[in-house]
Image: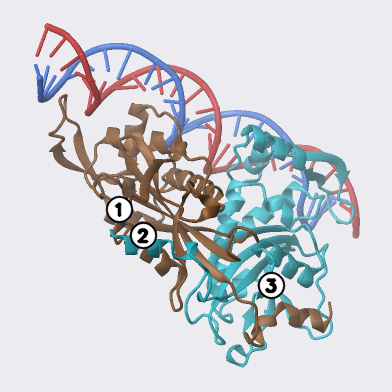
Chain colours: A cyan, B brown, C blue, D red
Amino acid sequence: MNKATTDQINRYTQSLEGSTMFNVSVDCVIFGYDQSHLKVLLVESDMPQFKGKLSLVGDLLSEGETLRVAAKRILYNTTHLKDVYLEQVEAFSAIGRHPYGRVITLAYYSLLMISENEIEDAKNKKLRWVPVGEIDEMAFDHKEILDTCYNTLKKKLRECPIGFNLLPNKFSLNQLQSLYETVLGITLDKRNFRRKLNSLDLLIDLNESQDDVKHRPAKLYRFDQEKYEQSIETGSLVFEI
Amino acid sequence: MNKATTDQINRYTQSLEGSTMFNVSVDCVIFGYDQSHLKVLLVESDMPQFKGKLSLVGDLLSEGETLRVAAKRILYNTTHLKDVYLEQVEAFSAIGRHPYGRVITLAYYSLLMISENEIEDAKNKKLRWVPVGEIDEMAFDHKEILDTCYNTLKKKLRECPIGFNLLPNKFSLNQLQSLYETVLGITLDKRNFRRKLNSLDLLIDLNESQDDVKHRPAKLYRFDQEKYEQSIETGSLVFEI
DNA sequence: TCAAAAGTGTTCAGGGTACACCCATGC
DNA sequence: GCATGGGTGTACCCTGAACACTTTTGA
């Protein structure tokens, strides 16, 4: 290794003048859960190259804005929601991924409950909730991004109690179980699932019941965020579903 | 939601003309293992702001180059090695992270064995292997990047058989065990560790022994890459250490 | 009283964990 | 023969997995 090489490694420590610059974007995979379906919020592409295809919601990064802030902005502009679960997944930088020029994009995914958050795009009907299983071709490399984010979600859902973000504040154990079954694409034993949840001690029994059903109403619970954060700090939580 | 909002979400579907562009860099956390120490390959910063501080090896992304190719280039220029284990971790985009201007960086980490790969920077002695435990302050936000990558490595090491990348092709079970103990910062029971490895059926007994030691020589094994890839495909592998 | 979904315990097998001594080699 | 690290087996416990019936409510 010679000096030239060392310098090259640190090219950006000399100056940024005249260096190549790039468009940077953020694409959000907004997952929602609704009546036993995992859906993604997509928009019809208005680019001639991708006529009729769906794309993720995204935007270019703005000056003076971090990637996370950009993702939150996109989320807010799309859903009018703040404090949504949001996680960075991966950068996509293939050369030809954008027809108008080089764009490096950062994929984020979000979780929210559909029923309590009506997303309306009344004027032009371009925004749609689409079940993940029904999405095949998409604009850009968005199918690849979606698949990557969905895999990340599945892995994360098994390791951390993030599923509550997809449910209303009050939920029944059966709702929670079918959420896991839907997202992970597996079936779970009801008794084992309940025993597991019980042992984690992360649910608060609200002593309330469903009241809009025409059969025996289920008891309602909510997620104990405080106890969860405490158990993170003490490292005592062993989640794993 | 009105039309203006929908347009804003898709700003980059109209044109990229005149949009804000960014410097993009790749920073590599090159982990190496050597005589029971996990080390990182660092370079002394030549920037006055970071005098005496160490920084990761990195470089600006070049036109027509993907992030992964840039990471491979940096790795090759630093170590003269190809086919090194390499994984993207996270994008860092804090506004003031670079003193000369806005730079969005993508962190990658790599694994290699130090003893078999002499990294020499004879001319100016700027490259150094530093034990992870001895690194405190670094240039830029590189300490944060390093910590993030180290945590990712620890998690990945428990879930996937990637530790072999830190060892020579031929290794003893004790070497493998102390690698895990060192990187994870835990102690493992020798008999349980061996039983576990045995049940995974991913090691090939080379019917060879160490010959440069002054005690009973250990048997040597190598990692069975083919069997590993097969078991990935069939989904039969349950690793987890 | 019936339909529909809620809720509840036990048994078994396999894997994780704890633990201590003999073995092979070089000097 | 001794110092040094290499190599091996067993017992227990706990967790994960399989499995079917009773209860509550509304209609």
Residue designated by label 2 = A6
**Residue at the limit of the structure toward the front, as seen here:** B48
Q: Mark 3 to mark 1: distance in Å?
A: 40 Å
Q: Secondary structure at mark 2?
A: helix
Q: Secondary structure at mark 3?
A: loop
Q: Earlier in the sequence, mark 2 or mark 3?
A: 2
The disc labelled 3 sits on which kind of residue? Ser
Chain of the residue displaying label 2: A
The disc labelled 2 sits on which kind of residue? Thr
- Whole-percent x and y of residue B30? 40, 52
Q: Please name the residue shown 24% across and 36% down the image.
A: B172
Q: Please name the residue shown 40% across and 69% down the image.
A: B69
In-front residue for pair A234/B120? B120
Residue designated by label 1 = B121
Q: Residue B95 bears which disc, if any?
A: none
Left or right of A115 on screen, residue A38: left
Left or right of A122 on screen, residue A26: left
Residue designated by label 3 = A62
Local packing at callout 1 (Cα closer than 10 Å; few below 14, some 14-19, many 20+) is some
Left or right of B66 on screen, residue D27: right
Left or right of A206 on screen, residue A27: left
- Whole-percent x and y of residue B64? 44, 79
Instruction: Residue B212: name its quadrant.
Output: top left
